[in-house]
Amino acid sequence: MKAAIIGASSESLHTIKKAKEYNLTVVALDGNEKAEGLAAADIAKVVNISKEAETIECVKNEDVDFVLTVPIGRYLTTIGSVNDALNLPGIGKEQAMYCTDKLLFHQTMAENGLRDCNCYEACSEKEDRDDLYDKIKTTECSLHFPAILKPRFGSGSRGIHFVNNLQELEQGLEKTLGESYVLEECMAGEEYGLDGAVIHGEFYLVLLRHKENTPLPARQAVAYFSVMPEDEFYGQVKLFMEQTVKVLGLNECLMHADLIRTEQGPFIIELSARPSGHNLHNLFTPLCTDVDLAEQYIRYRMGMEYSFVPEKTKMMMIHYFDMEGEVKEVPTLEQVKEVIRDSLVIWQCNIKEGDMLLKVSDGHSLMGRGFFVLEGKNEEKLLQDVKQIKSMFLLEKT
């Protein structure tokens, strides 16, 4: 059998590796000829995946059996178009649009009673921005601060602006001219993420993760804690996501989502019909649950036995290095093991003496530094271990 990978960044390597373990021939497509997934695949095609017709033709010529999704942003819609055009299993373009167009996503969820906040389109042109600002200023459009400006298309934390009042809104609208944005109210509560799948119309919650974020305005996740299925919020999320996938028509796909735990229950920030990045779906989720989403989806597509139901969920945490300053001293693995002992599962530190660690502003400023994974009794104990680990680094603030 033959599978296509559309978008062959380094985030695709885990899925390519798993596909090869099952003797699948992997065709990888990416516009960057140096993309790591192209080198790892059996067949590499340098194709601009933003061009749907060109991508469809390339996949058609390779006569693939299905497309395997990997972490990808806006051009998830290209995967949907390929599936539609070639009658391949998986999401279609309509479903992909819900995952990549934040305004369409909000409108659809709100119409079905699954998203309760004010959200407006901030078009790319200044005249439209001025009109939106005037309507909010005169309360013709209702908006409660704080609010968030974020790019309408794509996913992730790129280009986000938090605004606390009319003056900051005016400045934010000016700074983001030239690209379509959405403006919506911020919801209060702790942030969570999840990994899951929708197979034969049934939603499977594989892992719910509690986030540790940097303060506003960045709100970049620097750690994730696994949430036990016995937690009350876990059950609320499962029920909410079952309703969500039905409303959006999601099926035959892997997925991840970001949510907020509010007093009223789950509030969904966004979701996408593809696996999570940042060493979550490929590393953290399998460690916590023994469920490798990529592998199980491959088994499903090949007609083999599969399961997206964890037999047990371990209390674990993945933490990225979010320190600031000039690095004077870095602990060795042996030194960390001596202090943390049994809780350390993985240590991957790319930080070196002399490095200048700037303030974390987004995922790109964080992920290259590495990460560590700990296992423990609860979040409090894991956070104590994190504090000890960080104290072993000698940093000079600038």
Image (tube, grey):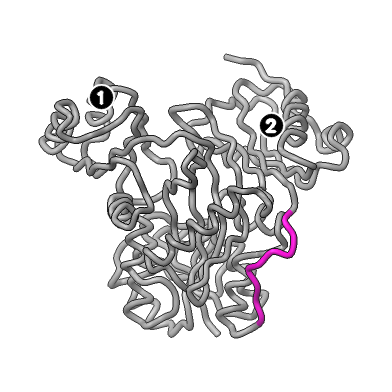
Identify the residue at horizontal 72%, vertical 62% (top origin): 290
Q: How many marks?
A: 2
Q: Secondary structure at mark 2?
A: loop
Give the vertical position of 101 relative to 91 (above or below): above
Q: What amino acid type should be assigned to the residue bearing mark 2? A: Lys
Q: Which residue is mark 1?
A: 171
Does the image show residue 196? yes
Q: Nearer the viewer, residue 310 or 335?
A: 310
Question: Could you say where residue 111 lies in the image, as x and y percent from the top left?
Answer: 29, 55
Question: Could you say where residue 142 lies in the image, as x and y percent from the top left?
Answer: 23, 34
Residue 246 image-quadrant placement: bottom left
Crowd class of label 2 (few under 14; some 14 to 19; many from 20; radius 10 Å): some
Q: Main secondary structure of the magenta part?
A: loop
Identify the residue at horizontal 52%, vertical 67% (top origin): 203
Q: Secondary structure at mark 1?
A: helix
Q: What amino acid type should be assigned to the residue bearing mark 1? A: Gln
Q: Is residue 187 left or right of residue 182?
A: right
Does the image show residue 8? no
Query: Given contact means CB atoms under 8 Å apart, are the residues at marks 2 and 1 in contact?
Result: no
Q: Which residue is mark 2?
A: 352
Residue 390 image-quadrant placement: top right
Q: Nearer the viewer, residue 142 or 120?
A: 142
